[in-house]
Amino acid sequence: MIRSIVFVAVLLALELAPARAQVLTSIPAAAADDPKAFWSAVMEEFYGGYDKRAKCWIGAVGGETLCMRPHLVSTVSVEGAPTHFVAMAGYAPGADGGRADCHACTGKLGLVILREAGERLALVARNDLATDAGSWGTVPPEEAFRVVEFGKGNHGWLMEFFYTGQGYTEGGVGIFGAVGDRILDLGFVSTHSDNGGACGEGLGECYVYSYEILSDPSGSDSRFADLIARKLESTAASSPETVRIPFSETALTYETPAALQAALGK
């Protein structure tokens, strides 16, 4: 009970506290009109100089050396101001300077939100610049990311991630959003399950259960309204067409509801 009260207090403090003074970066606002200039300025701002040999920007984050590159930027208007949702991806070089290459090896993900503030861009929020994400040493590809509106003009990222082992594929969506000036991991919601590589020809019946995640910002006045899982494909005729996914204000996460777990055959 005490832990729940503390979490709610933290959330309320971050959402209701007076707006802090803007933190201006060294990135010119005009750079947003030139992708090459924008990315060069952004990468140097958060990671450091470009290494021609490694073909990435090298920086130290949390005592770890990272090799990072631009991933994608999505620009939306928030309260009338152009706001840039920036994702940067890379890895922590091994002893040989290369990228780890194993199923359980993650890439590194940096997320920042920048907003135009006069002649420079202001930093709205950022993650730790080195969040573990993906597998085989890489972050999921650009097309796996979507910027959506969670609620009340509050935008964030959905990141699709799939993994296969012994013929079974599982997948879902990682959720990242700003709480105050921090971009947090807001949970992972399962959306896909199939046994396409381990069924048929005497191996058992094939199945596939697949949903997509949509945002529904008009459904609530909350900054984190319910998400919606909408059915794409299912071998079970009784699977629901949609399942609502509420935000837990105690855990600060979206969690896979029992109805969606059941729809995925779990």
Image (cartoon, grey):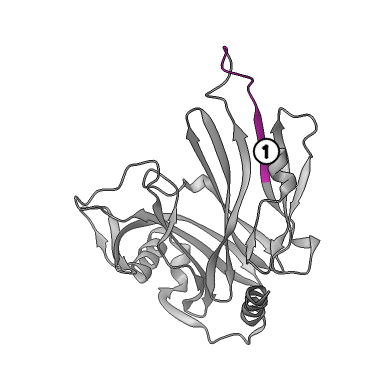
Residue shown at the point (63%, 67%) measured from the top left: 252
260 sits left or right of 193 in the view: right
Q: Is residue 210 part of the magenta span, yes or no?
A: yes
**Residue at 63% across / 82% down in the picture?**
13
| 32 versus 140 height, above or below | below
- Crowding around mark 1 (Cα neighbors within 10 Å: few <14, some 14 to 19, many 20+) is many
Q: To which quarter of the image does residue 14 belong? A: bottom right
Inspect the image, locate mark 1, and give the three-letter code of the amino acid beneath it: Leu
Which of 151/202 is in front?
202
Across and down, in percent, residue 135 comes to 42, 45
Q: Is residue 235 above or below residue 138?
A: above
Q: Which residue is mark 1?
A: 264
In terms of depth relative to the viewer, which is nearer, 234 or 126? 234
In which quadrant of the rendered image does the N terminus lie? bottom right
Q: Quadrant of the C terminus?
A: top right
Q: Is residue 184 left or right of residue 224?
A: left
Q: Residue at x 57, y 12 (%)?
A: 202
Residue numbers of the magenta segment = 201-212
Classify 260 as above or below 245.
above
| Image location (x, y in percent) of residue 185 | 54, 62
Q: Please report the residue visible at 63 percent of the width from the left and 66 percent of the height from the top.
A: 251
